[in-house]
Amino acid sequence: MKPGLNDFLIGARAALPILLGVVPFAMITGVAAVGVGLSPWDTLGMSVIVFAGASQLAVLQLMKGGSPWIIMVLTAWVINLRFMMYSAVLAPSLQKMPTRWRAGLAYMLSDQAFGISMSYFATHDEIDKRWFYFGTALTIWVTWQVSAIAGSLLGTLIPASWGFDFAFPLSFMALMFAALRDRPTVVAAVTGGLMAVVGKGLPNNIGLVLAAMVGIGCGMLAENSLLKARQGRQA
């Protein structure tokens, strides 16, 4: 098997656990689009052109409320600004590719593809990063489009309990579990998660801020403890 194809398939396989969250998230987006009066073809067009679930749902909510089109455009633009940061981080890994390829890969960029790729790149120097990212991004893109059109066709048959609050965190939970490779990250995830649950009722979502701080702090302490233990063994 050619090295590029092999790395592409590795990337595609790495994306499979994430699809557990991508599928319901995309289906909900399709259901929401039909709910504001879009046809399945309109929904597919929006999904293909925009390909950004959070901004799609935000725009659909604004459409439902009758907001002006300029507000919809600006809202989507602000929500998607994070992709500029993602692109800057990925650029060194893709800069040797022709412009047309880089344009296509930039179009397929998603939170999930970025998270999977950067997590894998951190521990696998031998991988062809371009082909790995392509395999991951294309798998997520195809799954999203198929699931979105399925959601638009099923419409009201999708249970109302399958809300955005369920699907979006689920996809990032899959990313988190894939990143738990050592003790410090496990400590950070567990303590941060427990703090988020304990602080759920705090005003202004301050519980999430505290959870992030506690998780990072505990992870750093665990890492320092691990480093000292290794230095003691070496001595």
Image (cartoon, rainbow, N blue to C red):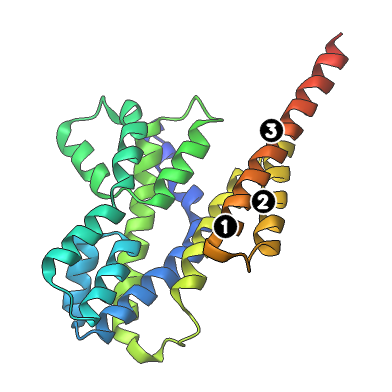
Image disc number at residue 206 = 1
Residue 216 location, quadrant: top right
Residue at 23% from the left image edge and 48% from the top image edge: 107
Q: Position of residue 91 (x, y in %)?
A: 31, 30
Circle count: 3
Looking at the picture, does residue 35 appear above or below residue 49? below
Looking at the picture, does residue 128 appear above or below residue 61? above
Q: Which quadrant does the N terminus fall into?
A: top left
Residue at 35% from the left image edge and 40% from the top image edge: 86
Looking at the picture, does residue 21 appear above or below residue 213? below
> Counting residues from the N terminus, which is met first, the one under dot 3 or under dot 2?
2
Instruction: Judge left or right: residue 131 versus residue 188.
Output: left
> Counting residues from the N terminus, which is met first, the one under dot 2 or under dot 1?
2
Secondary structure at badge 1 equals helix
Looking at the picture, does residue 27 appear above or below residue 212? below
Q: Which residue is mark 3?
A: 220
Q: Position of residue 12 (x, y in %)?
A: 43, 49
> Counting residues from the N terminus, which is met first, the one under dot 1 or under dot 3?
1
- The amino acid sitting under disc 3 is Met
Q: Which marked residue is nearer to the observer: mark 2 or mark 1?
A: 1
Instruction: Judge left or right: residue 187 versus residue 167.
Output: right
- The amino acid sitting under disc 1 is Ile
Note whether residue 61 is visible.
yes
- The amino acid sitting under disc 2 is Gly
Residue at 12% from the left image edge and 69% from the top image edge: 69
For the residues labelled 2 and 1, the Cα–Cα distance comes to: 13 Å
Secondary structure at badge 2 equals helix
Pick the residue in front: 101 or 61: 61
Residue 25 location, quadrant: bottom left
Q: Position of residue 2 (x, y in %)?
A: 38, 33
Q: Which residue is mark 2?
A: 192
